[in-house]
Image (cartoon, helix red, strand yellow):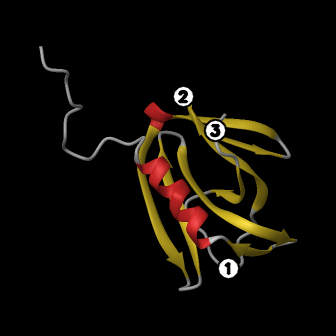
Amino acid sequence: MPNKYKVFFHDGPEIGLKTSVLKGKAWIDEFGLKIEGRAGIRVIPATNIKEVEMFRLHGMARVIRVDHTEGRLFLAVVRFMIGQFASVNFFKTGELHTSLKSLTIPNGSPPKSLPG
């Protein structure tokens, strides 16, 4: 069973301190990234993920940016969330970033073929 992370997330071109975010759970399985929120489960297939980057939001919290064929998603693993205030889990966000990064193919590199 995959690790499920308690996260905040936002679909949109950018994120800031005043951006309204949603609370949910995220995990990675054989299909790609799944996010469960109030509206149900959303799936971003691994083949649709173009780029994954982690950055510091205003120097305070780690946030992951996922660019995919349908747009852009921001998410971070939280310890707790009260309204729009969230305490971001630094290490778990890094762990999720590493897992997401492994789904992408490095730019300019063709997929590795099997010897034969």
* Figure check: 107 above or below 87: above
Residue at horizontal 87%, vertical 71%? 83
Residue type pointed to by label 2: Glu
Whether label 1 touches label 3, CB < 8 Å: no
Residue 111: percent from the left, percent from the top?
A: 24, 31
| Residue on which the image places disc 3 | 2
Q: Which one is earlier in the sequence, the residue at label 2 or at label 1? A: 1
Task: Tell which circle, 1 or 3, labels the residue nearer the N-terminal end.
Answer: 3
Mark whose residue sits in front, 3 or 2: 3
Judged left or right of residue 51, residue 81 is: right
Question: 7 or 13, which lies in front?
Answer: 7
Quadrant in which the C terminus appears: top left
Q: What residue did someone put label 2 on?
A: 30
User: Cα distance, mark 1 to mark 3?
Assistant: 30 Å
Of 83 and 89, the residue lying toward us: 89
According to the image, label 1 marks what residue?
17
Q: Which image quadrant is residue 82 in?
A: bottom right
| Position above or below: 87 against 108 | below
In the rendered structure, which amino acid carries the disc numbered 3?
Answer: Pro
From this viewpoint, is residue 46 visible? Answer: yes
Label 1: which secondary element:
loop
Instruction: Determine the image quadrant of residue 3.
Output: top right
Which SS class for mark 3?
loop
Q: CA distance from mark 3 to mark 2?
A: 10 Å
63 left or right of 80 in image: left
- Bin the neighbour count of mark 3 within 10 Å (Cα to Cα): few under 14, some 14-19, many 20 and up: few
Q: Residue at x 82, y 69 (%)?
A: 81
Q: Position of residue 58 (x, y in %)?
A: 56, 84
